Image (cartoon, rainbow, N blue to C red):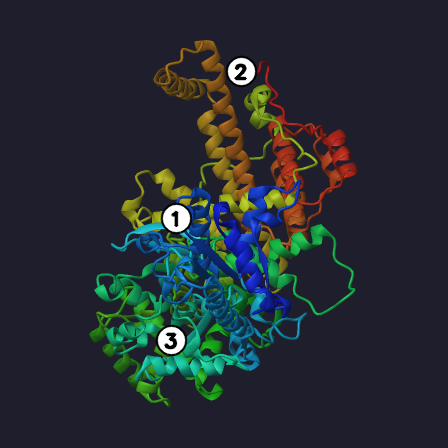
């Protein structure tokens, strides 16, 4: 809590009672002269000031708000509005609100004022005193006591030891940054989003968890649920710090060992003494409305009802529980007065904030800052690493997108030294290091880790063969017996299983079914088993590789590439890729192929360079919002079961083949990115080329569908019928020729951006800053406009390298279709949107590539 020189009093009164204000001020002169407080009321507004704004600002800045109550006050809309604001501040900031009763009136019937401790003593009106000086002296003494207590509360300091050992402690991450000696929570904290639920445990909305502090007066009792490693305790730390800054007295309580045995009142008193130092005031002397117990791990409490009842005197309470309690306890009247929230995984926007905070940390002073595009390159590379590790490239994910996992991935990748004799990739080692960290933190000895890893490897494969996401108790017991028959178990069985549960690697649910806590653990160990038994498991591996359109198989294949660089795996995925859309040749984007499309360039939207005020940071934020929505939609579809992964999912063979292509190429891309320095060049070139060709064959198949005039006319007519219906419903009657022109424009622009999207997909699926030499070799060898686009798209995104002269010369080739040129112009314009490009460079781009710097539709007429 930051100390200030004196307290600030705000006086709220009716101007009809102004004489009383003068009397009040006169009697408080000794306290004011002692520097204990300064006061403000609206007569201090000087000429020219914004009257309302000045009142509002001083009200917000107040430590004590005095309401001078009379019939005049109660009849004043302005006074009653100030009263409402004062009570909101009492809830939000712990501001003291003191009613001073000037004259008899109906204040006791006001539900907001009557519960407050009024002055003079017992709420006797000043006007009822025989000696008015005695009345004001009573007010003086009462306010003096309030100020003394308020000053003592403001001067309460959080113990340095508590701050260092808990509030700012980042545990595993504290010494893990290459550029900073010690990482404190304030350096890296980002408020997570929480889902808000109603009394029926129905989802209402998502909000930033910082809003819970702002809305504290509306939700004085809150229950926050979250999974393991979701950041529940970290949020407690931040709430503690922020609430203290608001002049509340937060008290943190946790007891996962004794399960809250004993009186919680004693625990609160002990914690107050441990967490605050040089206390000039006892806990008993602090208004109970200012004290906020933060009860962590409440789900461990054996007697929850007793604990809740003991907390009743506290107006504000924060309970932290695990996700199981959050799901199963909804009907209990015990927590019916609590507003329920659940911590969400980090969205792309929040991951971006976290990544930026981590990357910008340094102890170096005076060091020259890198240029903006180098910063963007670092951010984009780290984001891709994180998204890849979380499994976002292939689906909704295999690892929770909580800060712990995001930062552990970055930290492990940056700082852990992988043993040279291991075949595992650097990213694969990130997963392995996480698993080792779980076990060592639980106290597992280094000599025993191999036993745990072997047990988990065998268990994962056993579960994979059972085709079940969970093992019933009898099957798990059967596995244990099978394992003990095959391997020596130097660790006691109960100890091994307890440690696996405590580390959240493996667990059992309420139905006594056993499973891995996170998907990535299951995939990691299944792939580890396959890598160690390649010869025996060839049939299984072939089945996995042939079904990469299914997420489970795609993830296992990626992890297999982490564990092994065996030629059999490489050859199999190349063989599979070469069979995808095998009836078609890879598309080249030449004039010969796109002559029919080039005739429509008059209706294609032109690329435009960003305006001077369109800053890259703003554009990136907008792009992240779109990514947030897309990721949320994908998760929603998965929850609703819209993406069932079985053969009956696909109504059309074409859809199945397209999904298989996308997933296969994603896996191929992850293989070569992970093995960029450990696979031979010819293997990297073969994987890249076959992956690129697979997508280009998809493009060719699409062009075959739209290149015939009959097909074009049919789709344009369909669009026209839909537009006509919409216009009719709106009560409009547009000219049919105009509608047909609009329909034609929609059709051709849709086709154009499908081609653009496929090129973009190739760039991001197969591109890497570590593979630019490989990519350049393959693309230059192919020598097609499509390969040219892909090469420069990868250079722009991964190397932040816009080779303008090379691009300008390249598109002069007779083979280059107008559509290919337009795709390239759009890629260059997109590059300029999200990177730092000087005005001079933009002028050069505009002149050489004919990309205008204002938005313009290149159409014959400007219909809507």
Q: Secondary structure at mark 1?
A: helix
Q: Disc 2 vs disc 1: Cβ atoms closer than 8 Å?
A: no
Q: Nearer the viewer, residue 810 or 141?
A: 141
Mark linked to residue 863: 2
Q: Which mark is residue 456?
A: 3
- Asked whether 848 or 570 is in front, the reply is 848
Specify few, some or many for label 2: CA neighbours under 10 Å numbering under 14, 14-19, or 20 or more. Answer: few
Marks 2, 1: nearer the viewer? 1
Q: Relative to residue 857, is residue 812 drawn left or right?
A: right
Residue 700 vs 70, above or below: the answer is above
Q: Position of residue 437 (x, y in %)?
A: 49, 77
The residue beneath circle 1 is 71
- Check disc 2 and report its element: helix, strand or loop: loop
Task: Tell me which label, 2 or 1, sits earlier in the chain.
Answer: 1
Q: Is the N terminus in the top left, top right, bottom left or bottom right quadrant?
A: bottom right
Res. 517 visible in picture: no
Report the mark closest to the observer, 3 or 1: 1
Left or right placement of residue 22 versus residue 507 in this view: right
């Amino acid at each position: 809590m930051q100390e200030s020189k004196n307290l600030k009093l705000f006086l709220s009164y009716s101007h009809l009672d102004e004489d009383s204000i003068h009397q009040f001020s006169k009697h408080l002169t000794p306290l004011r002269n002692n520097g204990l407080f300064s006061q403000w009321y609206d007569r201090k507004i000087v000429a020219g000031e914004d009257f309302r704004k000045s009142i509002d600002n001083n009200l917000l800045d107040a430590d004590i708000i005095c309401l001078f109550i009379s019939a005049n006050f109660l009849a004043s809309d302005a006074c009653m509005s100030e009263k409402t604001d004062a009570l909101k501040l009492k809830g939000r900031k712990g501001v003291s609100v003191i009613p001073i009763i000037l004259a008899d009136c109906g204040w006791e019937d006001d539900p907001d004022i009557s519960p407050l401790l009024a002055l003079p003593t017992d709420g006797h009106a000043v006007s009822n005193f025989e000696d008015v000086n005695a009345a004001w002296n009573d007010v003086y003494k009462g306010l003096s006591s309030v100020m003394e207590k308020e000053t003592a509360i403001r001067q309460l300091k959080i113990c340095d030891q508590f701050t260092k050992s808990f509030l700012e402690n980042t545990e595993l991450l504290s010494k893990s940054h290459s550029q900073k000696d010690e990482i404190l929570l304030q350096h890296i904290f980002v408020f997570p989003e929480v889902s808000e639920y109603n009394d029926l445990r129905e989802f209402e909305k998502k909000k930033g968890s910082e809003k819970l502090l702002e809305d504290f007066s509306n939700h004085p009792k809150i229950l926050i649920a979250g999974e393991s490693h979701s950041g529940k305790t970290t949020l407690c730390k931040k709430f503690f710090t922020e609430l203290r800054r608001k002049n509340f007295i937060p008290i943190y309580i946790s007891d996962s060992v004794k399960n809250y045995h004993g009186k919680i009142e004693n625990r609160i008193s002990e914690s107050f003494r441990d967490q605050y130092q040089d206390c000039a005031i006892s806990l008993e002397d602090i208004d109970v409305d200012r004290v906020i117990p933060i009860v962590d791990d409440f789900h461990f409490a054996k007697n929850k009802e007793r604990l809740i009842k003991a907390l009743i005197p506290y107006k504000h309470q924060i309970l932290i529980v695990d996700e199981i309690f959050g799901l199963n306890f909804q009907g209990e009247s015990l927590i019916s007065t609590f507003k329920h929230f659940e911590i969400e995984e980090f969205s792309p926007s929040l991951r971006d904030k976290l990544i930026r905070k981590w990357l910008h940390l340094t102890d170096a002073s005076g060091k020259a800052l890198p240029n903006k595009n180098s910063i963007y390159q670092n951010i984009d590379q780290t984001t891709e690493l994180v998204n890849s590790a979380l499994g976002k490239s292939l689906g909704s994910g295999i690892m929770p997108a909580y800060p712990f996992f995001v930062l552990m991935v970055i930290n492990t990748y940056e700082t852990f030294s992988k043993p040279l004799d291991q075949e595992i990739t650097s990213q694969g080692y990130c997963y392995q290091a996480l698993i080792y960290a779980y076990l060592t933190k639980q106290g597992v000895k280094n000599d025993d880790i191999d036993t745990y890893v072997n047990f988990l490897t065998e268990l994962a494969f056993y579960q994979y063969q059972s085709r079940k996401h969970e093992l019933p108790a009898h099957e798990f017991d059967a596995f244990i017996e099978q394992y003990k028959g095959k391997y020596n178990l130097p660790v006691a069985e109960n100890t091994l299983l307890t440690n696996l549960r405590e580390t959240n690697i493996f667990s059992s649910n309420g139905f006594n079914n056993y499973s891995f806590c996170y998907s990535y653990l299951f995939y990691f160990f299944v792939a580890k088993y396959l890598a160690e038994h390649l010869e025996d498991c060839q049939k299984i591996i072939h089945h996995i590789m042939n079904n990469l359109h299914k997420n489970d198989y795609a993830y296992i294949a990626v992890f297999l590439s982490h564990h092994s660089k065996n030629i059999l795996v490489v050859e199999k995925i190349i063989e599979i890729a070469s069979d995808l859309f095998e009836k078609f040749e890879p598309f080249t984007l030449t004039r010969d192929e796109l002559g029919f499309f080039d005739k429509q360039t008059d209706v294609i939207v032109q690329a435009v360079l960003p305006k001077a005020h369109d800053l890259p940071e703003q554009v990136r934020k907008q792009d992240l919002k779109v990514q947030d929505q897309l990721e949320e939609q994908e998760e929603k579809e998965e929850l609703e079961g819209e993406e069932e992964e079985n053969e009956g999912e696909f109504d059309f063979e074409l859809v199945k083949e397209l999904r298989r292509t996308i997933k296969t190429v994603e896996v191929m891309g992850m293989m070569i990115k992970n093995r960029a320095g450990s696979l031979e060049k010819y293997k990297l070139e073969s994987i890249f080329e076959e992956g690129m060709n697979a997508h280009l064959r998809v493009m060719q198949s699409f062009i075959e569908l739209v290149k015939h005039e009959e097909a074009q006319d049919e789709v344009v007519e369909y669009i026209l019928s839909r537009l006509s219906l919409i216009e009719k419903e709106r009560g409009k009657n547009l000219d049919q020729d105009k509608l047909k022109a609009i329909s034609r424009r929609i059709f051709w622009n849709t086709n154009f951006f499908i081609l653009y999207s496929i090129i973009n997909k190739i760039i991001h699926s197969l591109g890497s800053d570590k593979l630019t030499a490989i990519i350049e070799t393959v693309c230059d060898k192919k020598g097609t406009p499509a390969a040219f686009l892909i090469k420069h798209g990868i250079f722009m995104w991964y190397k932040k390298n816009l080779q303008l002269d090379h691009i300008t010369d390249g598109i002069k080739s007779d083979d280059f279709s107008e559509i290919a040129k337009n795709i390239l112009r759009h890629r260059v314009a997109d590059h300029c949107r999200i990177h730092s490009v000087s005005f001079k460079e933009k002028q050069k781009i505009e002149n050489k590539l004919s990309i205008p710097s204002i938005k313009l539709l290149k159409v014959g007429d400007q219909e809507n």
